[in-house]
Each structure stands twice: as C-alpha cells, then as structure tokens.
Image (spheres, rainbow, N blue to C red):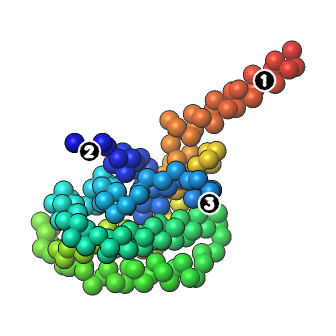
Amino acid sequence: MDEPRESESHRLIGGELCLDFANTVNEHMRPSPHEYLFDYRDMLLWGRHAGVLSAEEFGELLGEATRHPRQAQAVFRRGLELRETLFRVFTALAAGSRVDENDLERLGAIWQVGQAHLRLFHSVDGFSLGWDDEPSLERLARRVAASAIHLLTSPQMHQVRICSGEHCDWLFIDTSRNHLRRWCSMDECGNRAKMQRRSIKQKLTATAG
C-alpha cells in the first residue's frame, strides 16, 4: 500500500477551489518553497481530496495518465503555471493592487476552453450546469479556472486575503464579521504569532526587571 501523500492531507482553508489550489505550495517566491504537488498523480489526489474529482473520475484520469505519461507531465506543468497565475492574480487583489493583464488573459484562455465542456442537465429543482464526461487530462485545471472566474466576478472578490503569518502566503476568503481576519488558520499561523508575541513580551519584561 502506498504511503499517504501530502496532496491528500493538504489543508483546505481558502474558501474557494481556486484559492485552495493556489495554496498547494507555500512561500511561492522563496528559493525552497514547501511543495504539495510533485507529479500529475499528486494533482489528481489533491483534486479527489478537495472534492472536485469523484473517485470514479480519479481512477479514469489516472488510467489516462498511465497510458499517456508525456501528455500527463505536460498537463501537470501547465497546472503549476495556472497555480502561479492564480497566486499572482489573487495576491494582487489582496494587496489592493491592479491585476496584471497578461495574467488575466492566461486565466481567461484556460476558462474559455473549459466552457466547451459545460453541459446543462435536469436537476431536482429544474436545471443545473455540470461537466461532460470527456476523459481529458485537463479536467481539473478547467474546473479550477472556472472557480477563479466565479470568484473574480463575485462580491467575495473583495474579501480575498493573504495570511500575515511568518513564512506563510496562503490565500483565503475573509468571512469574519468585521473582515479583519489576518491568519489562514488560528490553530497554526494565529497561535504561532501569539506565541511569538508572548515570547517577545517575556524577554522585554525580563530585561526591564
């Protein structure tokens, strides 16, 4: 039995699929970031973990990747490029900066291709949009891009934040009442910051004494 991969236990704190995908690496800009995705299989494992791929889809796409390894590797590289595009777009929004037009074009191009695979289905309440069953290796990237477009065109766009924790640049939607949330999670980055402040205070007290 294979050892569990970090892609299967990655914390989903973004509040939107595209942000969680952007968060599959930490410290994007540093020479040695913490990476969660190392190959196409990892990307599929993450997609299943995030609930965007069913177990059946995971098996189907893994089979396609096994039959077409070079194509899968190329799709994986493009997936990481999409991830970095998402990170630049949403960190710019979080900082109140203008989003680079080239990044918007890259994201829009992926989204436009994916739209050809949307279908209208009957549902319990009437109709709903869903995806066709084409076994494309690009399936996950298309759904991530659709999530990004949805967020960029929703009021929640203004609630995107970047974690203030040391050595953390994870993105999240701030749904707190006063919209002043600073940490991706209180039990990790928030508590770490509290401990650092407490340690500094204790050192200052000891020095003053």
Residue sitting at x 43%, y 70%: 77
Marks 1 and 2, how far apart in space?
46 Å
Q: Looking at the image, which residue is at 61% across and 68% down?
A: 92
Q: Which residue is mark 3?
A: 29
Left or right, 3 with reference to 149: left
Q: Residues within 10 Å of mark 1 (few under 14, many from 20)?
A: few
Question: Callout 2: helix, strand or loop?
Answer: loop
Tell me if mark 2 has few (under 14), some (14-19) or many (20+) residues whose alpha carbon lies within 10 angstroms of its own: few
Q: Secondary structure at mark 1?
A: helix
* Marked residue nearer the N-terminal end (1 or 2): 2
Q: Residue at x 78, y 23 (%)?
A: 203
Image quarter hosting the N terminus: top left
Q: Which residue is mark 1?
A: 203
Per the rendering, the mark at residue 2 is: 2
The nearer-to-camera label among 1 and 3 is: 3
Across and down, in percent, residue 67 comes to 21, 70
Rendering coords of residue 86 (x, y %): 50, 68
What secondary structure is marked by label 3? Answer: loop
Task: Answer whether residue 171 is visible to the viewer in this image.
Answer: yes
Q: Residue 82's x, y, as percent?
A: 45, 71
The amino acid beneath tag 2 is Asp
